[in-house]
């Protein structure tokens, strides 16, 4: 005789098994937790300082380049590149400041948190020209300034490489953005 | 306004004692690799410690802890997106055949390994619901943690139960 299997039987068994799993006892002491939390905050601060220093170094190198460069076009190109770096640093800072506060994950429902994370990634990917375009005038002028010193083949190769690099990067980011948007749409529907 | 450290210490000790096991299971359900699983667990504990400085009782401690844990784990899923497989929702999972469907529950360890593998295939939100359901968290709390409506949670739990029932069908209780 067949006894009808109630759906809850295996489910209840699994739930029981799940909750009866032995602990792995890989506990961290409270001091370790506090130390790691402090390290996390120090790392964040250090990273901010490093990126700021990096921008300062790049700007200093470009300024030096401007001071020794005889060609006007190259000097203008380098100045525009500095402006692009400063803009990128500002953009990064604004983005970094948007990160969640310590209590953030607890205050945000997980579907909202997940959606925000996906949307943040989508926005980063969706506007690749936002951080690629500022470099185009400066790099373009610098390259153009030395164009007469190079052979036409070299100039053509550099131009093709630059275009492929920019378009390829933009295409890759757009593709990621579309995939993330699909996921956000599914989340909104379901 | 952050809490005094003594309060934070007391709260953290309570949370670690009450939810330590659940957090270990959660980390294991997100990360199969034991080293990465340990890192994730530590990351969750650090995030919990930091968050408790601002716990204001606006929601229950259980909701607070699960939100922090799932959100930290979800960040990891998003960061690791490039090296992971495509995730599915519970509806899709229901339609995917598994080689061991209907197999008897041979032993506890193997069954749990299969449950973990199944959870890791799910999208973050479905994964969270399944984990919370397995932890015996009630539907209103699941809704509070995830932000889904109670009706949506009930539907998803029903699907999860169907998947579990089909995948872990106990032949021993099927016939007499």
Image: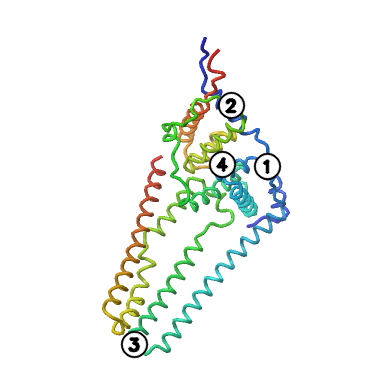
Give the numbered dot on residue A24: 1
Asked if badges 3 and 4 are on one and the same chain, I answer: no
The local crowd at label 3, few if under 14, some if 14 to 19, many if 20 or more residues have their Cα within 10 Å, is few
Q: Position of residue B96 (x, y in %)?
A: 42, 33
Q: CB atoms at circles 3 and 4 under 8 Å apart? A: no
Q: Position of residue A65 (x, y in %)?
A: 43, 85
Secondary structure beneath dot 2 equals loop
The span from disc 1 to disc 3 (Cα, nearest Å) is 68 Å
In the picture of the structure, the residue carrying the numbered disc 2 is B106
Q: Position of residue B90 (x, y in %)?
A: 45, 35
For the view shown, which residue lies furthest in the left direction?
Answer: A152
In the picture of the structure, the residue carrying the numbered disc 4 is B29
* Chain under disc 4: B
Q: Is residue B54 left or right of residue B94?
A: right
Look at the picture and state if A75 lies above or below B144: below
Identity of the residue drawn at 54% across and 48% down:
B71
Secondary structure beneath dot 1 equals loop
Instruction: Choose mark 2 or mark 1, whichever is in front.
Output: 2
Asked if badges 4 and 2 are on one and the same chain, I answer: yes
The span from disc 2 to disc 1 (Cα, nearest Å) is 23 Å
Instruction: Choose mark 1 or mark 3, whichever is in front.
Output: 1
Query: Of label 4 and label 2, which has the lower sequence position?
Result: 4
Secondary structure beneath dot 3 equals helix
The span from disc 4 to disc 2 (Cα, nearest Å) is 21 Å
The span from disc 3 to disc 4 (Cα, nearest Å) is 61 Å
In the picture of the structure, the residue carrying the numbered disc 3 is A72
Look at the picture and state if A59 lies above or below B172: below
């Amino acid at each position: 005789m067949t006894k009808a299997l109630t759906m809850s039987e295996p489910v209840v068994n699994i739930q029981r098994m799940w909750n009866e799993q032995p602990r792995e006892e890989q506990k961290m002491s409270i001091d370790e937790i506090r130390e790691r939390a402090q390290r996390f905050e120090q790392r964040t601060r250090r990273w901010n300082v490093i990126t700021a220093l990096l921008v300062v170094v790049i700007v200093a190198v470009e300024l030096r380049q401007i001071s020794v460069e005889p060609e006007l076009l190259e000097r203008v190109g380098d100045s525009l590149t500095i402006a692009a770096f400063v803009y990128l640093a500002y953009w990064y800072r604004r983005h970094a400041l948007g990160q969640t506060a310590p209590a953030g994950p607890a205050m945000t429902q997980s579907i909202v948190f997940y959606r925000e994370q996906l949307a943040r990634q989508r926005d980063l990917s969706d506007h690749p020209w936002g951080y690629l375009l500022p470099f185009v005038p400066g790099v373009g002028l610098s390259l153009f300034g030395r164009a007469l010193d190079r052979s036409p083949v070299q100039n053509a190769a550099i131009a093709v490489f630059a275009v492929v690099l920019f378009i390829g990067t933009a295409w890759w980011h757009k593709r990621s953005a579309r995939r993330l948007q699909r996921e956000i749409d599914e989340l909104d529907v379901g | 306004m952050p809490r005094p450290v003594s309060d934070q210490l007391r709260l953290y000790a309570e949370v670690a004692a009450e939810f330590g096991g659940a957090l270990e299971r959660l980390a294991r359900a997100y990360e199969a690799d034991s080293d990465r699983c340990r890192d994730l667990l530590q990351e969750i504990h650090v995030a919990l410690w930091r968050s408790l400085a601002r716990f204001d009782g606006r929601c229950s401690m259980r909701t607070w802890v699960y939100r922090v844990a799932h959100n930290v784990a979800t960040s990891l899923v998003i960061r690791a997106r490039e090296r992971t497989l495509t995730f599915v929702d519970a509806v899709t999972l229901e339609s995917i055949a598994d080689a061991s469907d209907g197999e008897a529950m041979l032993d506890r360890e193997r069954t749990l390994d299969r449950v973990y593998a199944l959870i890791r295939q799910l999208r973050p939100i479905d994964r969270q619901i399944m984990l919370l359901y397995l932890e015996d968290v009630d539907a209103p709390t699941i809704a509070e943690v995830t932000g889904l409506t109670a009706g949506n949670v009930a539907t998803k739990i029903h699907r999860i139960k169907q998947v579990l029932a089909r995948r872990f069908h106990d032949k021993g209780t099927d016939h007499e």
